[in-house]
Amino acid sequence: MSGHSKWNNIKRKKEKTDGARAKVFTKVGREIGVSVREGGPDPNSNGKLRDLIAKAKSMNVPNDNIQRIIKKAEGGDKEEYEAITYEGYGPGGIAVMVETLTDNRNRTAADLRHFFDKHGGNLGAMGCVAFLFNQKGVIDIDLEGKDADQAMMDALDAGAEDFDAGEEAAEIITDPANFSEVRQAMEDKGYSFLSADVAMVPVTTTTVDDPDTLVKLGKLLDALEDDDDVQNVWTSLENEEDLDR
């Protein structure tokens, strides 16, 4: 859930996600609950909810869990969450954006500032790194048993902006406005998602070679991702696969 999603990092990220299933369920469940309260419980009329259900399934959240979350939110769950995005720099000058859903902004801000300070980073003001990122739809699909060229044609026909294939998986980039349409089209054609979300994609990336800096950065990202209020973490790090985490 951190960094710039690339097909050569998908498997590692997937394994990390599978190793923290309970926390992943909680985070995506919070998103689903907010979506139901804002747009209703019917995924046919609530496009955001439909996308979140697909996201939850890609993270192996059982359907029973998904339906319980929807029913709880539909039944008047009183928990109110505020979406706040924090920005800063990690070790090595790597830009970091942190998307949160919180019921206590003071607690969340204090916790994030502590994480950045502890691990050699600096939590900055709003806008300090946002200009280094573009919002894009990012859909990672499993290519096992699929033809990469056909998958590329299917994605581009559905309205995707870009397609980058590896041996086992591919990354599809879309305009945020077309994300739902492209994701649904690929689902209808039988593709399995490793992940699918609207993300902040860095305009340029930076490679960090120093091992000590990579360790510090990895610890910062782990601390952020482990926080209950944090939904997503994005960075400008190019060589995410080198993180010692």
Image (spheres, rainbow, N blue to C red):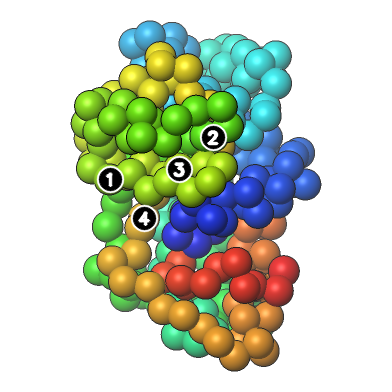
In percent of the image, x 27 and y 45: which residue is there? 162
In percent of the image, x 70 and y 74: which residue is there? 244
Q: Quadrant of the C terminus?
A: bottom right
Determine the image quadrant of residue 88. Answer: bottom left
Q: CA distance from mark 3 to mark 4?
A: 18 Å
Q: Under tag 4, what secondary structure? A: strand
Q: Under tag 2, what secondary structure? A: strand
Residue under pointer 4:
200
Kindly identify which numbered label has been placed on residue 142.
2
Q: CA distance from mark 4 to mark 2?
A: 22 Å
In percent of the image, x 54 and y 56: which residue is there? 8
In percent of the image, x 56 and y 27: which residue is there? 145
Residue under pointer 1:
162
Which of the two discs, 3 and 4, sits closer to the camera? 3
Query: Residue 207, image x and y in percent?
Result: 46, 80
Label 4 packing within 10 angstroms: few (<14), some (14-19), many (20+): many
Front-most of 54 and 207? Answer: 207
Q: Amino acid at mark 3?
A: Ala
Q: Is residue 193 above or below residue 200?
A: above
Q: Amino acid at mark 4?
A: Met
Q: CA distance from mark 1 to mark 4?
A: 15 Å
Q: Under tag 3, what secondary structure? A: strand
Residue under pointer 3:
170
Q: CA distance from mark 1 to mark 3?
A: 10 Å
